[in-house]
Amino acid sequence: MAEIVNLNRYRKDKNKAAAEAEAVNNRLLFGRKRVEKDLARKAAAKEKEDLDGKKLND
């Protein structure tokens, strides 16, 4: 015989898992110190500048 499933509980568990996954992602993106953010911005700007300097056409 099949197991009885409470659809409300299933929906809440699914939403909770999705929220936790989003929280983990946000911790990775926004959970850095200002120094780390500044270094990442500077590295991205330098990488963009280097790439733009290597373009053949304007």
Image (cartoon, rainbow, N blue to C red):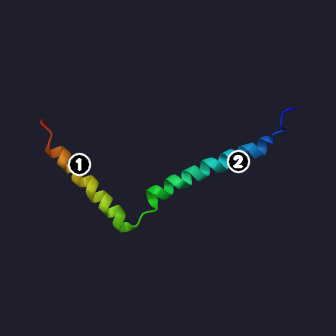
Of labels 1 and 2, the one closer to you = 2
Q: Position of residue 20 (x, y in %)?
A: 60, 53
Say which quarter of the image contains residue 23. bottom right
Residue lying at 34% horizontally and 67% vertically, measured from the top left? 35
- Specify the quadrant that holds the N terminus: top right
Residue tagged 2 = 13
* Residue type of the residue flagged with mark 1: Lys
Secondary structure beneath dot 2 equals helix
Circle 1 packing at 10 Å, graded few (<14), some (14-19), many (20+), is few
* Distance Cα–Cα, label 1 vs label 2: 42 Å
Q: Where is residue 22 in the image (x, y as percent from the top left)?
A: 55, 51
> Horizontal placement of 28 versus 14: left or right?
left
The extreme top residue here reads 1
* Residue type of the residue flagged with mark 2: Asp
How many numbered circles are shown?
2
Residue lying at 22% horizontally and 54% vertically, measured from the top left? 46
Please give the label number shown on residue 9: none
Residue tagged 1 = 48
Residue lying at 40% horizontally and 67% vertically, measured from the top left? 33
Earlier-in-chain disc, 1 versus 2: 2
Residue lying at 23% horizontally and 48% vertically, measured from the top left? 48
Asked if residue 27 is positioned above or below residue 56 in the image, the reply reads below
> Horizontal placement of 57 versus 11: left or right?
left
